[in-house]
Image (spheres, rainbow, N blue to C red):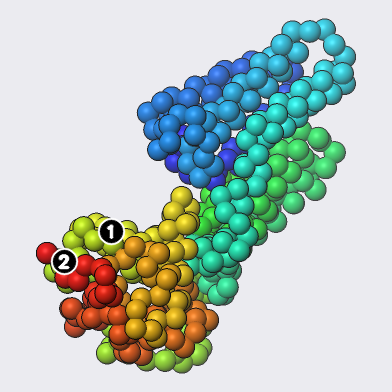
Amino acid sequence: MAIWLMPETMPWVLLAQAGLGWYWLFRPPVPPLLINGAAFFATLAAALAVDPPHGGYLTPEIDRLSIVYVGLGLAILLVTFSLARLDKVDLPTKSRNLIGIFVATCIFLAWLAIFPHVALGPFGLMSASEMHIFFGSISETQPARTASQVVGLLGPGILACTFAITQILYYRRRLLPVGAWSLFMIGTVLATGLTARFLIFQQYPSAFLCGILPIMLDRITTRLGSREHYAAAGRVGLVAVIVLGPIIADAAPKMLWNHAKIDHHRPTCSMRHIAHLLAPAADQIVLTRPGEVPELLYRTQIIGVGSLYQHGVRAFLRDWAAWRANADHKSEPAAVRASGARYVLFCPAGKSYPIAQKSGPEALWTMLSQNRTPPWLKKIGQQKSSGFRLYQIVTDGRAQIAK
């Protein structure tokens, strides 16, 4: 179910399966293994049956449920079937374990060979240069920078990982719990590292900490059981650190340093009442900031050039190129023409959007930010409450005013 909702959960789902495999090495046999594999495969197959990709059931996609993950379900089913069969064969424990590890590894590598895009990750969808441009425009794909982000988003993972290390050291002479806590630590480190680089993974370190919080509270109780007041203070203190730590980290800079006053005269760029402004552009392609497109599609009848969706990278790059094109000419730039846009929607925000950073002085975004209208644009509307301005492209040879 997790893979269906958010395919990026796949590494942690695999770690859970690896945990069952580790248990199998030390506690043979494990009757639920085959049931787990069958249920895992059946769940993914049923999900694909009701929610296939746009291209059809056999279209491989890594950023949504597809045949790639049903293939993973089949691989897990084959592994669990193989391990269940090994339990019925009279083999020495060492041979049984080595054969099981070999079979599981071969099946997993075969799945990767059939779907190599899984190993490539986002690089399987776009080039490195396109990734830099595309993800640089998405707030969720930025790294953790501020103190509140480090404490609030990475802190839970660091705390969970530290506790896992203490448990590994505590159980160092017992391989089964050491392996279990090692898998947990690997998952926590992966989640924390990904969150440090991409904020979109921020829920995972907290989930790991929530998962072991009852164990942490129990350890405090057992270690300080004879001193009830200390145990109670320890439990309350642990929860307080988790809850209040991010709040303090967020509030401290605001209390210690003076921040610039909010400029209430700056345009809000709110799209709540933008439908009337964009009525003339109904059913037409409008060049606008990619991040605004989803809400514009909801509130108006326009067509966007490109937005921040991984399957629309080409359209996004056309949007990116159009805003950065040299607009100081009598006719529209080639990049704007390539976008197919007949209108331009612009709001002079207080700071440059990522899509326009490091653009030239004659770039379309720069000129409009300085209230300089290129000769090939005609302003046909403005919304004073939000600051949005609507322009029409009036180059010769193209339709002028929409009917």
Tell me if 232 is positioned left or right of 56 in this view. Answer: right
**Amino acid at circle 2:** Ala
Residue 354 drawn above or below residue 292: below
Could you say which is closer to the camera, residue 86 or residue 369?
Answer: 369
Pick the residue in front: 230 or 252. Answer: 252
Q: Residue at x 54, y 55 (%)?
A: 201
Q: Residues within 10 Å of mark 1 (few under 14, many from 20)?
A: some
Q: Where is mark 2, residue-wise? A: 402
- Residue depicted at x 76% and y 33%: 176
Q: Secondary structure at mark 1?
A: strand
Q: Quadrant of residue 278?
A: bottom left
Q: Helix, strand, or loop for circle 2?
A: loop
Q: Nearer the viewer, residue 40 or 48?
A: 48
Choose the circle earlier in sequence order: 1 or 2. 1
- Residue 3 can be seen, yes or no: no
Residue 394 in the image, given as x and y percentages of width and height? 25, 76
Residue bearing mark 1: 303
- Under mark 1, the amino acid is Ile
Residue 159 picture location, percent across and down: 64, 58
